[in-house]
């Protein structure tokens, strides 16, 4: 009897030791002197992923997932998301530290599905000098001289969109309309590709699979998205090869503001591969149109609920309109006069950032705030971590465009990211927003049908019902 009792005690001690070891292992305590951030790693692989997704689906990631953990653990805490040990950081100092140390301490780390669908040879995945080189080709088109040529093209695209989709209507779905318009701007003004029926739907099918499970079987979202991407690649290859043939014959090289021209010049010189050209074209379409259309929708939402701001914005645009001759388009200089409009846009982007943040991966052991972030762990920064911080934005829940009359501390306002990976299409998005709002407010009276429409994630934030509005022409 004593032997059996002793055996049971010994076995229990072994089980307790094993459980204790596994718990410490799961929570990152590897027995060395590294001080890991506080937090809960949760279950093996799953971790806290379900709670993360639940909060994200409601567009309440910061309020429901991050903020409660900051209250318990502080602005640096560990968790486990999608199989990876992850450290979530918040605040200006964290943004500055991790975003400015891209390629030195961390690198971009997107889910495998996103990499495959956006393009593993795009700047999203490039690091160091290769990233700098390819990004330079893109930003050259968006330099001041390039933007000068882009503005009239954007004006033409916006006017054509309103004529085709708004004229004769008394109600439209603003988010869908903005999405069609921003897609046309990227395709026609930047890539020189005429938009044909079904083209936007093809890109939308790809986006649906970006953050879904990597199940490459018929009927699953990733499989459908991958199939749609193959159609896009085939279409873009035809464009690129035709354009390259024209340029090698000395035709079409003088097309101003065309990114495709710039990329093919690099292709001809051997500075970039054909696959890189295609992947960066695909990435730019997604980066430039979905986030911009959401920004336009949220700006209009804020204007509709703040009539004084709308009055000031309208006065700014009427003054610009009255300075133009009949039929004369806007210029880059005109957009620089839209100071209050851009304040409204930035305040809307502060309150409703198009992306919640982004993941990075530690490429070395990182010492931060007295903690060690082990090599290979993920780091998640969020825009909400500073956008709603009262230390940088007084009364952060209130809409106050005038707060942007004064300089904002670096890395406090980051709707487009920051550091070496700051959004390459930032200036294009700005122009698109300003030009669209100009024609919208000077040519139409409008009002929201559902002022308090919920925001959901699909996979980026979208108005649940597409933001329907009533419209009537002003003349």
Image (cartoon, helix red, strand yellow):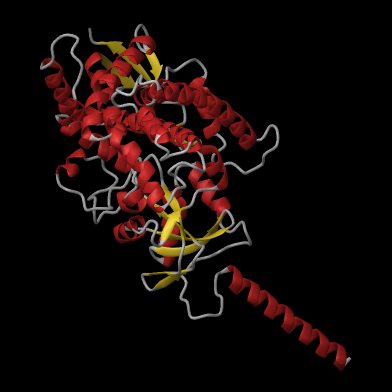
Closest to the observer: 119 or 204? Answer: 119
Q: Quadrant of the C terminus?
A: top left
Q: Nearer the viewer, residue 36 or 4?
A: 36
* Residue 165 seen from this side: yes
117 relative to 87 in the view: left or right: right
At 58% from the left edge and 59% from the top edge, which residue is drawn?
47
Q: In this rendering, would 243 be left or right of 216?
A: left
Quarter of the image for the N terminus: give it. Answer: bottom right
- Residue 307 in the image: state x and y as whole percent: 22, 28
Name of the residue lying farthest toward the bottom: 2
State the image quarter where residue 389 is shown.
Answer: bottom left
Q: Nearer the viewer, residue 19 or 69?
A: 19
The residue shown at (33%, 24%) is 253
Count how many numbered circles sit on residues in the image. 0
Q: Position of residue 292 (x, y in %)?
A: 36, 32
Which image quadrant is residue 290 in? top left
Residue 118 left/right relative to 408: right
Residue at x 43% of width, y 31% of height:
285
Spot occupied by residue 184 in the image (x, y as percentages of width and height): 39, 21
Q: Is residue 42 above or below residue 181?
A: below
Q: From this viewpoint, which residue is outermost toward the right?
A: 1
Q: Residue 275's spot in the image, x, y percent?
A: 51, 36
Compared with 305, 86 (above or below) is below
Is there any visible trace of residue 455 in the rendered image?
A: no
440 is higher (above) or lower (below) than 371? above
Residue 449's place in the image compared with 23, above or below, is above
Is residue 353 or residue 152 the one in the foreground?
152
């Amino acid at each position: 009897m004593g032997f059996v009792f002793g055996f049971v005690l010994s076995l229990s001690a072994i089980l307790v030791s094993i459980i204790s070891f596994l718990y410490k292992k799961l929570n990152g305590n590897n027995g060395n002197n590294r001080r890991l951030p506080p937090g809960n790693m949760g279950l093996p692989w799953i971790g806290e992923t379900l709670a993360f997704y639940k909060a994200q689906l409601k567009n309440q990631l910061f309020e429901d997932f991050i903020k409660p953990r900051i209250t318990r653990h502080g602005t640096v805490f560990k968790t486990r998301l999608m199989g990876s040990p992850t450290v979530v950081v918040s605040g200006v100092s964290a943004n500055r530290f991790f975003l400015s140390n891209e390629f030195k301490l961390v690198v971009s780390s997107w889910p495998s599905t996103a990499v495959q669908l956006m393009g593993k040879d795009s700047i999203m995945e490039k690091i160091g000098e290769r990233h700098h080189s390819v990004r330079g080709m893109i930003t050259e088109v968006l330099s001041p001289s390039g933007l000068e040529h882009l503005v009239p093209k954007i004006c033409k695209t916006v006017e054509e969109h309103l004529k085709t989709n708004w004229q004769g209507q008394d109600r439209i779905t603003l988010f869908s309309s903005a999405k069609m318009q921003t897609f046309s701007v990227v395709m026609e003004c930047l890539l020189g590709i005429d938009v044909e029926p079904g083209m936007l739907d093809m890109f939308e099918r790809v986006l649906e699979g970006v953050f879904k499970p990597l199940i490459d079987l018929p009927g699953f979202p990733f499989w459908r998205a991958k199939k749609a991407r193959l159609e896009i690649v085939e279409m873009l290859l035809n464009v690129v090869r035709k354009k390259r043939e024209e340029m090698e014959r000395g035709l079409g090289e003088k097309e101003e503001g065309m990114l495709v021209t710039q990329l093919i010049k690099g292709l001809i010189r051997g500075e970039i591969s054909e696959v890189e050209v295609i992947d960066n074209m695909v990435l730019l379409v997604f980066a430039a149109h979905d986030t911009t259309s959401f920004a336009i929708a949220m700006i209009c939402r804020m204007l509709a609920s703040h009539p004084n701001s709308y009055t000031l914005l309208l006065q700014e645009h009427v003054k610009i309109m009255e300075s133009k001759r009949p039929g004369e388009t806007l210029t880059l200089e005109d957009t620089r006069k839209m100071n209050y409009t851009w304040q409204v846009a930035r305040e809307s982007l502060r309150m409703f950032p198009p992306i919640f943040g982004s993941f990075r991966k530690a490429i070395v052991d990182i010492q931060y705030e007295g903690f060690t972030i082990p090599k290979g762990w993920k780091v998640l920064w969020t825009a909400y971590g500073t956008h709603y911080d009262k230390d940088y934005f007084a009364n952060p829940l209130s809409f106050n465009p005038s707060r942007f009359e004064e300089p904002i501390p670096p890395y406090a306002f980051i709707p487009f990211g920051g550091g070496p990976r700051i959004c390459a299409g930032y200036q294009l998005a700005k122009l698109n927003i300003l030009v669209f709002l100009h024609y919208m407010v000077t040519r139409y009276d409008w009002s929201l049908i559902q002022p308090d429409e919920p925001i959901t994630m699909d996979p980026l934030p979208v108005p649940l019902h597409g933001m329907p509005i009533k419209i009537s022409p002003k003349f």
